[in-house]
Amino acid sequence: MPDEVILDVRDLHKSFGALKASDGISLDLRAGEIHALIGPNGAGKSTLIKQIAGGLKPDRGAVHFMGRDVSALSVAQRAQAGLGRTFQISALAMEYTVMENAVLGAIGQSGRTFGFFRPAMKDRALLDIAGAALERVGLADHASTVTSELSHGQRRQLEVAVALTLAPRAFLMDEPMAGMGAEGSRELTGFLRELKHQAPILLVEHDMDAVFALADRISVLVYGKIIATGSVDEIRSNADVKTAYLGEEDAA
Amino acid sequence: MLPERMINLLILGLLLAVPLVALAMDEPFIITLATKAAVLAVAGVGLNLALGQGGLVSFGHAAYFGVGGYAMGILASHAQSYTPIMEVPFLIEGTKSMLVIWLVAIVASALVALLVGALSLRTSGVYFIMVTLAFGQMLYYFAISWPAYGGEDGLSIYVRNGFPGLNTLDPIQFFGLCFAVLLIVLFVVNLLNKSPFGLALNGAHQNEERARTVGINVYRLRLTAFVISGAITGLAGALFADLNRFVSPTMFSWHTSGEIMVFIILGGVARLCGPVAGAAVYILLEHVLGGLSEYWHIYLGAILLFVVLFAKGGLVGGLSRREVRHAG
């Protein structure tokens, strides 16, 4: 079902003092799509992502995932339910090898955190899941590299690989292109275009070329409010968006 | 630079060889020192699971060491005075059996660790250190003010408790027993470290956010590690009490917590045999420097400073080369 709603954010409110970081945000993510979330700095993108992932409790509103209200679930429980997340600044176990990081993902997903006596790095089932994820992002050759020795771009790839080990039903990606070179960006764009058929992606991204090339829909967040949602063309031609975000000189 | 496994074998080999040589030279005191090192090593290995693997800097592990010690003291003192521990609602008698005492020490210290961990793991950083320290000190003052079991004076047990098939009063046999316990504990901890549980525990230490994001319940993970860690240190406490045939509130004091931590820092944080090397060196220094000056802790401090500044990873870390933990 192409139009099935996987992730449904309903009327989220979150204030920090007088600052309304989320002011009644509603958006959804449908099967097979990349839904890009753009907005100027300070618009509340990170706050929104945190609330969807479960790290921050909204003052009001709900998050539904796969038809279920997950508002009360923790980060770990939402991940278990199939919400794969990548971070703007790589959050990886830096002393672990690439393979160990991927196995960590497989452990979390399999719910085998309390397996005490069989070595994790000799467990076929875990290694297969981890190996397949590394293969997909093109890091299989670096399986034994210590993560801290990876290049910035490779760390981004590993973030995606770890998310993949969760067999996610939806991805939350916070600026996956950040700091990547043109070459890397292009490669990742191609990869994400394919990945969305496995699970839809809610993408926060500053790289406008990537957003316009990738997104099926775009939502524009300004001062905690979504001022427009629509296709690439609709957003490009939306007057409010031009004023608020794409630069006022273009609007003239 | 040697692989860590070689260094581990070397450390354990030395710890085994010293009392055997001492036996041949008829030096029972040296055997007792080696036994003390082996027992304290068990306590260190226990703390290292929480501190090294989990990154949980507990400054209150004396609590479990003391609970283990008092488990031995209470059970054995009732057995030696032929008085039951309680009669209502059902009869519980003391015992002189080490196996029973160990079991009680492990269960009791695990329960205390569960309680302390459940509360203290809600905090982190300096607060975690302070909360664990506070719990340790609470038990210390409780032990001091509990006259039924000796209060400040502690409890003396006249005859060492028994183990089937061994004469535990013979220093070398008791050493063998403690050394065997150390090996078993190392074996179990090594399995834990390599298991999915261990990988998750250390992963959450390196990056908590990452562990959560892959669906790991970090609180439960750490609490489990904390309880296992406390239980191992509790077992060490029971052995230590049996070694001295004496328990006192000192076992609960924050000095004890600090000492156990020193074994780990000296030997190597998160290294399997780090606490073994640390405890052995500590005992050696205590004996050698302690013979020179009453204020030997000054020299210990200097050595500790040197290790922390120049040999990150302690003795084991300084001697071993960095390893990738798996192939391919």
Image (cartoon, helix red, strand yellow):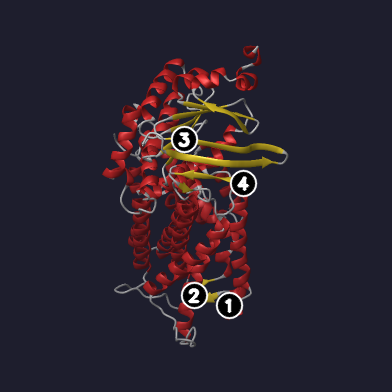
Label 3 sits on residue: A29
Cα distance between the residues tagged 3 and 2: 64 Å
Three-letter code, disc 2: Gly
Towards the viewer: B136 or B249: B136
Expressed as whole percent of the image width and height from the top left, the position of residue B234 reads 47, 64
Towards the viewer: A48 or A216: A216
Instruction: Pinpoint the chain carrying mark 3.
Output: A
Cα distance between the residues tagged 1 and 3: 68 Å
Label 4 sits on residue: A60
Cα distance between the residues tagged 4 and 1: 58 Å
| Marks 1 and 2 in Cβ contact (< 8 Å) | yes
Instruction: Pinpoint the chain carrying mark 4.
Output: A
Expressed as whole percent of the image width and height from the top left, the position of residue B104 reads 43, 72
Q: Is label 2 in a helix, a strand or a loop?
A: helix
Expressed as whole percent of the image width and height from the top left, the position of residue B128 reads 59, 53
Quadrant of the snapshot with the C terminus of chain A: top right
Label 2 sits on residue: B73
Residue in the picture at 58% in, 81% down: B148
Label 1 sits on residue: B150
Q: Is residue B249 left or right of residue B233?
A: right
